[in-house]
Amino acid sequence: MGHEKTLTGLMAALAGANLIYGPGMRESGITFDFAQLVLDNEFAKMIKHTIKGFHVDKETLAVDVIHAVGPFKDFLGQKHTLKHMKSQSQPQLIDRRRRPKWEELGKTDIYERASAKAREILETHQPDPLPESVLSEIRMIIEDAEKELGVDKEK
């Protein structure tokens, strides 16, 4: 259920694969889980972000900030860190808040948050309608299959 899928997918992606198999699958594909699909979507985004690579230049290296702050000090409060942290991975389900805030907000684990997101998607998502040309093609495929199989539409 967890990040072992991220690690498995990341290793393959780093080796050059561009297909992630099994989103939403559990128990070696025996079970499909909508919450797992939501989790896997988040993990796939993180993998894609990593594979994209990172821009490295004088600004992003921040050697001057490193020297100014010094070893064993706080880099998180630096304006430079705040400026650049948004370009890093921004997960929606992984909770990076401190424990008191997490407890205050209900102490949900990642699977509970993914389940809630899956329910929200299933209840509210409105897919874009297919173009009429695609619908016509689908109808034609169905009609051809029905003729080939001798399906009587009148019954």
Image (tube, rainbow, N blue to C red):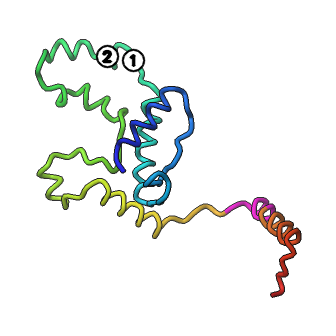
Identify which residue is drawn at 58% across, 62% down.
127
Q: Judging from the image, what secondary structure is the residue with disc 1 in?
A: loop
Q: Is residue 99 left or right of residue 29?
A: left
Give whichever of 107, 55 is nearer the camera: 107
Q: Can you give x and y, in whole percent of width and height, for residue 105 in the image?
A: 19, 59
- Mark-to-mark CA distance, 1 and 2: 6 Å
Q: Is the magenta region chiefly helix, strand or loop?
A: helix
Disc number for residue 99 = none
Residue that numbered label 1 is attached to: 56
Picture quadrant of residue 57: top left
The amino acid pointed to by label 2 is Leu
Magenta segment: does it hold 41? no
Q: Judging from the image, what secondary structure is the residue with disc 2 in?
A: helix
Which span of residues is magenta-colored?
Answer: 130-137
Q: Can you give x and y, in whole percent of width and height, for residue 78 in the image?
A: 19, 27
Identify which residue is drawn at 44% across, 60% down.
33
Picture quadrant of residue 53: top left
Identify which residue is drawn at 30% across, 32% down.
85
The amino acid pointed to by label 1 is Val
- Tell me whether the residue at label 1 lies in contact with that at label 2, contact meaning CB atoms closer than 8 angstroms: yes
Q: Can you give x and y, in whole percent of width and height, for residue 48 in the image?
A: 47, 35
Residue that numbered label 2 is attached to: 61
Magenta segment: does it hold 132? yes
